[in-house]
Image (spheres, helix red, strand yellow):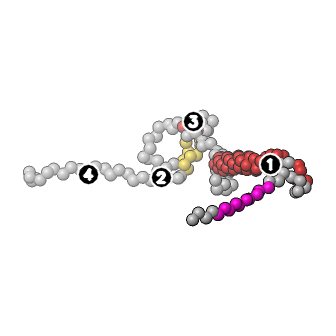
Amino acid sequence: MNEHLPAVRPAAPAAPAYDPVTLDLYPSAPAAVELAAERGPVVWVPDAYGRMVPMPKHLAPPPLPMPEPRDLRPLPLLDPLAQRFLGAGLGGGALAAGTGYGIGEVINAAAGFGSGAAMWIALGVLAWRMPGRALADGRRGSTVKIRKAVIKRSTFNA
């Protein structure tokens, strides 16, 4: 033979193709039998792709609690607490303004009463001091007579 050519090895036997009908690929050892009573409960959970896969119950994640039902009524435009604060602020401001206005009116009335009362007291004092005769009859009151006398003397010294 030729010394420069590598020696040809015999071809390895090809692996038999998978044939579900034949069981030659599996060893003929006695198989363990698993009874349904020996196996724990199995639950079906979704995997990462959304498929349902079986899993022993003790390894399964805890179930998600049922969420509380949501209140779907429309909410008010303003928060009720904010409405109360706004009402208290407006009411307090109105109360303060009304109180200030009322106190101002009382002070103005007292000042007006004081000046008006002073006028009436002055008129009363004048009426009290006036003699009763002058009020009853205009002639018998105290009268003042004014006389004016003009005396002219001419002297002529020549």
Residue topped by disc 1 = 126
Percent position of residue 130, x then y:
83, 48
Does label 4 or label 2 sit earlier along the sequence? 4
Classed neighbour count for the residue bearing mark 3: other residues with Cα under 10 Å, few (<14), some (14–19), many (≥20): few
83 on left or right of 6: right
Mark 2 or 1, closer to the camera = 1
Percent position of residue 139, x then y:
88, 56
Classed neighbour count for the residue bearing mark 2: other residues with Cα under 10 Å, few (<14), some (14–19), many (≥20): few
Residue interval drawn in magenta: 145-154
- Residue 139 vs residue 87, the one in the foreground: 139
Q: Give the CA separation, mark 4 to mark 3.
A: 51 Å
> Residue at the spot x=76%, y=57% of the render?
147
Question: Mark 1 near mark 4, Cβ–Cβ under 8 Å?
Answer: no
Does the stretch in magenta take in 146?
yes
Does label 3 or label 2 sit earlier along the sequence? 2
> Residue at the spot x=21%, y=49% of the render?
9
Percent position of residue 47, x then y:
51, 48
Number of residue marks: 4
Question: Mark 3 near mark 2, Cβ–Cβ under 8 Å?
Answer: no
The residue tagged with tag 1: helix, strand or loop?
helix
The circle drawn on residue 11 is: 4
Does label 1 or label 3 sit earlier along the sequence? 3
Tell me which amino acid carries mark 1: Leu
Q: Give the CA separation, mark 1 to mark 4.
A: 155 Å
